[in-house]
């Protein structure tokens, strides 16, 4: 227990902040993922073959390639890509992107591919009559989506989105390879300096279990809220 | 795009793919047995056996695979007693540590897949077997298991693909699998996109093969023939 003391003697506070970092990265990545899902779900459901192809390409490639490889691509290629764009605008200095942004972008893109699939499935399972009824009532496209389709879709999507959240949360452990100090990285540092890897990695496992357990409980509450009336 | 690099790195990456495939097949093989074992425990009526299997699958599904590998590779070596036993021969090799971690991980997911498959078998089928005077053992092996396998094929196919992606974590414990070699080439040439295209292409090709094999098996073993 001494190892977990707060302050200078133990690793308690460091691990506490690392846990906050893991939560922050997971939430950011999840939101980035929603953004991607917002772009690619309509593409996958579009009438046009070419747009379908773009949507399918995204979800197939990201879901078929290991997360670690995507993270390496962002880690090694991220600043290069930004510098290339900057050089077009006449800026040639070295640009370093911070590990938080690289990490949450990489995980976000992965999480987005899963979210896209969830949203696609949820929209497709809504009865066609709902779309038609909305149209007949003269509701505009915006209202159709936000007031009629979205509430019904969320109910169906939440259980699967909770899976995506779990995957995203666990994937953030991989960002430790880029040096961002989250749970895994902090445990690695602590294990290295105290020569007690068994304790610190087991403790990391407990922290992850706690995170998944608490988030499951919260999501279950959401699920109950959105399935009222069914 | 540096085409030369893509061409020269292709054989290296292909060689590393063999390591990935070895890790994958070994962990799937052991994981399937482990999964079946724990699925049967989950169906047991004894609450302690039942809970034990549940806790196992909860822990391994609730923590990242990276933590599991690190605990086994870095953590277990710390126990002095283990170093004196024959287990140390296995545990000092990163290759076997990775396989143990992957097996335990895929075993947890497989046990969930198989459990739900067993639970969806209609009681009428088992009762029909019983009324024909077939022994419980034969009902289990000749009726329940084949139906469960068929039921769990789509989910198990996903698990194989997830596990294939999971083997990339072996590169974090010094193994030179496909991702490990890809990272090495990227960090020496600083050409991430080219290497990503080649390595990612190989991974996608494997995903494609697995996907189609599972699809074929699903069709072959479908109920409506």
Image (cartoon, coloured by chain):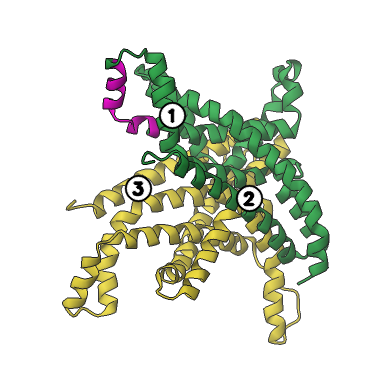
Chain colours: A yellow, B green
- Chain letter behind tag 1: B
Is A27 or A68 nearer to us in this picture?
Answer: A68
CB within 8 Å, label 1 to label 2: no
| Residue A196 showing in the rendered view | no
**What residue is shown at x 33% (from left), y 31% (from top)?**
B121
Identify the image quadrant of residue A192. Answer: top right
Alpha-carbon distance for marks 1 and 3? 38 Å
Q: Position of residue B208 (x, y in %)?
A: 58, 53
In the rendered view, would you say B119 is above or below A93?
Answer: above
Mark 1 — residue?
B146
- Would residue A155 be counted in the magenta stretch? no
Label annotation for residue A218: 3
Please indicate whether residue B169 sits to the left or right of residue B139 in the image: right
Same chain? Circles 2 and 3: no
User: Which secondary structure dominates the residues rendered in magenta?
Assistant: helix
Is B159 or B212 nearer to us in this picture?
Answer: B212
Q: Position of residue B47 (x, y in %)?
A: 36, 19
Mark 2 — residue?
B206
Please indicate whether residue B83 sits to the left or right of residue A171 in the image: right
Alpha-carbon distance for marks 2 and 3? 37 Å
- Chain letter behind tag 3: A
In the rendered view, would you say A105 is above or below A92?
Answer: above
Q: Residues within 10 Å of mark 1 (few under 14, many from 20)?
A: few
Q: Which residues are magenta?
A: B117-130
State the SS at label 1: helix
């Amino acid at each position: 227990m001494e190892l977990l003391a707060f302050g200078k003697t133990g690793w308690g506070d460091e691990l506490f902040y690392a846990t906050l970092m893991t939560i922050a990265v997971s939430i950011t990545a999840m939101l980035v993922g929603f953004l991607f899902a917002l772009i690619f779900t309509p593409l996958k459901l579009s009438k046009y073959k070419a747009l379908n192809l773009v949507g399918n390409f995204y979800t197939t490639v990201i879901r078929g390639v290991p997360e670690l490889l995507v993270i390496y691509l962002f880690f090694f290629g991220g600043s290069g890509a930004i510098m290339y764009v900057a050089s077009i605008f006449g800026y040639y200095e070295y640009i370093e992107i911070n590990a938080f942004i690289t990490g949450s972008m990489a995980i976000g893109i992965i999480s987005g591919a899963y979210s896209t699939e969830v949203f696609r499935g949820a929209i497709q399972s809504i009865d066609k009559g709902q779309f038609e009824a909305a149209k007949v009532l003269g509701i505009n496209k915006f209202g159709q989506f936000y007031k009629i389709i979205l509430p019904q879709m969320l109910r169906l999507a939440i259980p699967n989105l909770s899976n995506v959240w779990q995957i995203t949360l666990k994937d953030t452990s991989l960002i430790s390879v880029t040096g961002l100090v989250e749970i895994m990285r902090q445990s690695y540092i602590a294990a290295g300096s105290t020569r007690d890897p068994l304790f610190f990695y087991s403790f990391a496992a407990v922290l992850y279990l706690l995170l998944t357990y608490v988030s499951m409980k919260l999501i279950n509450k959401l699920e109950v809220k959105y399935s009222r009336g069914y | 795009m540096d085409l030369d690099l893509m061409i020269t790195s292709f054989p290296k990456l292909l060689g590393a793919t063999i390591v990935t495939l070895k890790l994958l097949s070994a962990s799937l093989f052991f994981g399937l047995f482990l999964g079946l074992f724990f699925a049967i425990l989950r169906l047991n009526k004894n609450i302690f056996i039942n809970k034990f299997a549940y806790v196992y699958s909860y822990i391994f599904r609730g923590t990242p695979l990276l933590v599991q590998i690190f605990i086994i590779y870095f953590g277990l070596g710390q126990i002095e007693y283990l170093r004196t036993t024959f287990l140390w021969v296995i545990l000092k090799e990163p290759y076997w540590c990775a396989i143990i971690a992957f097996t335990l991980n895929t075993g947890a997911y497989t046990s969930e897949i198989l459990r739900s498959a067993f639970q969806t078998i209609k009681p009428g089928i088992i009762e029909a077997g019983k009324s024909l005077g077939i022994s419980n053992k034969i009902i289990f092996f000749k009726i329940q298991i084949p139906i469960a396998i068929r039921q769990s094929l789509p989910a198990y196919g996903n698990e194989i693909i997830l596990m294939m992606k999971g083997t990339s974590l072996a590169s974090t414990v010094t193994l030179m699998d496909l991702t490990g070699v890809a990272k090495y080439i990227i960090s020496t040439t600083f050409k991430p996109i080219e290497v990503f295209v080649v390595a990612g292409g190989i991974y996608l090709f494997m995903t494609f093969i697995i996907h189609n094999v599972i699809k074929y098996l699903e069709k072959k073993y479908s109920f409506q023939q």
